[in-house]
Amino acid sequence: MKEAAKYRINYVTYQIGVMFFMFVSLHLKDDGYNGMQYGAVMSFTPLAVAVALPFFSFLDRGTQGRKILVACSSCVMAVATIVLGFDILSVIMVAVFAASIAKATINTSIDNLTTVYCIETDQEFSKFRAFSSFGYIVANLIGGFVYLMGFKWILVISVVGTLLYLVGILRVKPLSLDQSIKKHKPDFKLLFTNKPFLMFLVYQMLCFAVMTFINSYDIIYQSSIGLPSYVFGITTAIRVGTEIVTFSVLRRNKRISYKTMLAVTPILLVIESVCYFFLIPSGFIYGLMIFAGVASACMIFANNKYLNKIVRPQNVTVGLYAAAMVQNLFTGIMTLIGGSMIDKYGVKYLFLGSAVVLAIAFVFTVCFVKKEDRISFADPE
């Protein structure tokens, strides 16, 4: 099998392996738990990722190091997925926490590994990242229909996906570029005194975290207005399918700046949030997913590319970890708060809050995020 194909297939099997995360909250809701309880369980994933990332960043030392991390984490993920089948809240909380820590290293390592591979082979990262989106579509379409048979069947499919991913990641060849990067250690002082990078982190907090928050509660919103679980699979397919198409358009258009893409994202997400707040008729949700897909594509496409423009090469990996920490920390906090808001005010007020934050994110991006061609390498020699 060609090396590029391995990376693409790994993205698909990874998404199938973690598909149960999207349905845990719905399972708990259907079992009669309140918003605070399933909101707390949902918040475990981003909070555990934020806590675990510094440790994994320290251990991330090239292809072989990542393989060891991912192999161990995949085993933890598979065991935790099986344990979820006991269907006891306290057990579910422990299992989701363990699986979330495992997901932290797998998710970040696969992107880092693929990024280095793309640099080494002079290929476009989004061509590989699109397969993560494709895998996400497949996983949620399967999950949306399989959930009707029972949550435990989703767990079975997730375990199979994780084991396939484990086999695939172990077959990836070592990367020579990793060895040269290891000679140049990251300079934390330069990174965290880099104003464009610090503004980029604030953007992650205001926009990327809110986007993840909206996606996390999307399935709860749809359930609350009476839609069956398979509709979530269909809307996910539309949203992520639009994301894939937008990736292709952005790759061909070299005139749109990364800052413009970052600024467009919160505008489109505000439209989605406002429509959810006003409880639009269910049929309009399918069209609304197009806005959501374009928004996520713009952010994902621009995120790593923009960061590569504002930091030195030896600080890219640390910068990616720092951005992921900020994203997950604030997503976790918002998800926890969101669960309690559902109990007091109803699900629609979650999206009123997200619309306000996204409006602030747009103003912040326009005023404080520098256009990449105006940055004369932020880190000095």
Image (tube, grey):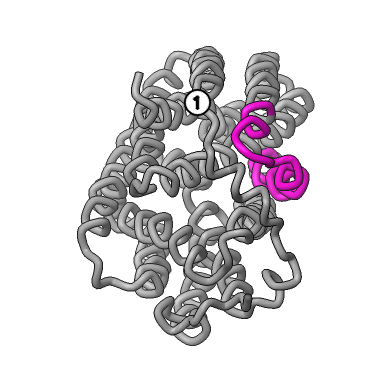
**Residue plotted at (26% across, 56% down):** 251
Q: Nearer the viewer, residue 249 or 41?
A: 249
Indicate whether 290 appears above or below 367: above
x and y percent of residue 156 in the render? Answer: 53, 12
Single out the residue that lies furthest toward the bottom: 367
x and y percent of residue 292 in the render? Answer: 35, 55
Which residue bears the numbered disc 1?
172
Region rendered in magenta: 40-68
Quadrant in the picture for the C terminus: bottom right
Quarter-of-image position of residue 77: top right
Name the element at disc 1: loop
x and y percent of residue 36 in the render? Answer: 69, 45
Quadrant in the picture for the N terminus: top left
Principal secondary structure, stretch drawn in magenta: helix
Quarter-of-image position of residue 21: top right
Q: Is residue 295 visible?
A: yes
**Residue plotted at (35% across, 54% down):** 297
Taking the image as shown, residue 283 lies to the left or right of residue 82, namely: left
Residue 377 inside the magenta-drawn segment? no
